[in-house]
Amino acid sequence: MPRSDAPNRALVIGSLLTLWIVWGSTYLALRWALEGFPPMLLNGIRFLFAGGALYLLIRRRFRATRAQMRNSFMAGGLMLFGGVGMVTMAEHHGIGSAVAATAIAVTPVWIGVASGLFGEWPGKREWVGLAIGLAGTVILGMEGDFQASPVGLAYILAAPIIWSFASVWGTKLDVPADPLSNTAVQLTAGGVVMTLVGLLTGESITAMPSARAWWALAYLAIVGSLLAYTAYIYLMHTVRPSLATSYAYVNPVVAVFLGVTLGGEKLSGAIYMALPLILVAIALVATAPAKQEAPRLEPEPAEQPA
C-alpha cells in the first residue's frame, strides 16, 4: 500500500502523540501482566482480543482480497512475534521495563538498515546515526539487567531488528488499503502466532492472575494494541518511516520515569550513558533530508505532482 501524498495533519499528530506516550507505558504494563500470565499466551490473548474487537467495529467497511489478507497476516505475525514477543520474553527473563525501552529506542536505526535492504540505503548522515546508535547499544549492554541475564539480552537485541524488517517489508506488500482493515488482520495474526507458540512450548495459566495483572492485560489489549498499533500502521503507510518511528525519542523517557517511580526499578550508570547516544542517533536518522529522485530526461508538465 503506497504512502498517502497528503496525510491528514491532525490524524498524524494524534497518532504520533499516542505512540509517544502509550508505547512508553506498555513496558511497565508488560512487567505487571507477566506476574499472572506466561509471555506468549499473554500476547496471544492480548492481540486476539484487539484484532477481534477491531474487526467487529469495522466489519461493514472491512475490505481485503485473499492475497492482501495473506500478506498482511505474514507481515503482522512476524512484526508482533519478533518485536513484542521478544520484548516480553526479555522482561520474562529479568530485563527491567526501563532498560528494555531504552534498548528498543534504537529501532529507527534498524529501520534505516531494513529500508536499505529494500533498495533505500541511508545517506551519510544516517550512517553516522547508525554508528552512534550501535555504540549506545553496546554501552547499554553493560547495564546490570543485561549482565545478569544474557538470554534476556539476546531477546531484546533481536526485537528491534525483527520489528524493523517486518515494518518496512509490510509497506512493500499488497495489503488492505484501509489502515483499519490492515491493522485488524495484523493484530489477529500476532495473536494466532503467539498463542500457538505458547501452547506448543507448554505455557499454561496455572493460577488465577492478580487484579493488577488483569488490569495490565486489559490496558495492553485496548490501549497498547487496539489504539496504538492502529496509529503505528497508519503512520507507516502515510509518512516517512523515520517519523513513524519517532516514538523512540519519547518512549525511553516515559518508560524510565514509570519504571523508577511506579515499578521500583534500580538502574546503574550504563543506561544514562547509553540513552543520550541512542537519542542522538535517532535524531540524526529522523532529521536526515529525504533523498531526491533523479531528474527525468523527458520534460514534464509544470503542474505535475511530485
Image (spheres, grey):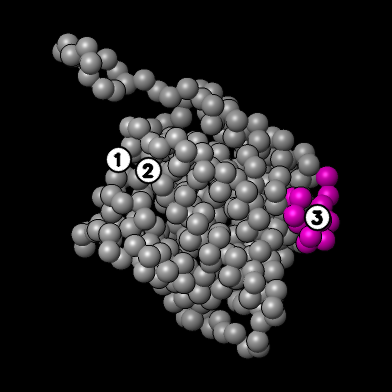
Image quadrant in which you'd find residue 52 = bottom left
Pointer 1 residue:
2
Return the disc, 1 or 2, that comes first in the chain's sequence: 1
- Where's residue 204, x and y in %? 57, 84
Element type at mark 1: loop
Q: Which residue is drawn at 60% across and 76% down?
A: 38
Q: Is residue 224 left or right of residue 177?
A: right
Residues at circles 1 and 2 in contact by the CB criterion of under 8 Å? yes
Element type at mark 2: loop
> How far is disc 3 from disc 2 in space, using C-alphas?
35 Å
Residue type of the residue flagged with mark 3: Val
Above or below, 48 against 250 in this view is below
Q: Which residue is drawn at 69% across and 78% down?
A: 211
- Where's residue 236, x and y in %? 42, 43
Q: Which mark is residue 260?
A: 3
Q: Nearer the viewer, residue 194 or 62?
A: 62
Element type at mark 3: helix
Return the disc, 1 or 3, that comes first in the chain's sequence: 1
- Where's residue 219, x and y in %? 60, 65
Is residue 132 visible to us here?
no
> How far is disc 1 from disc 2 in space, using C-alphas?
6 Å
Could you classify mark 3 by the number of other residues whose Cα lies within 10 Å: few (under 14), some (14-19), or many (20 or more)?
Answer: some
Give the position of the C terminus as an image quadrant. top left
From which residue to which does the magenta span run? 256-269
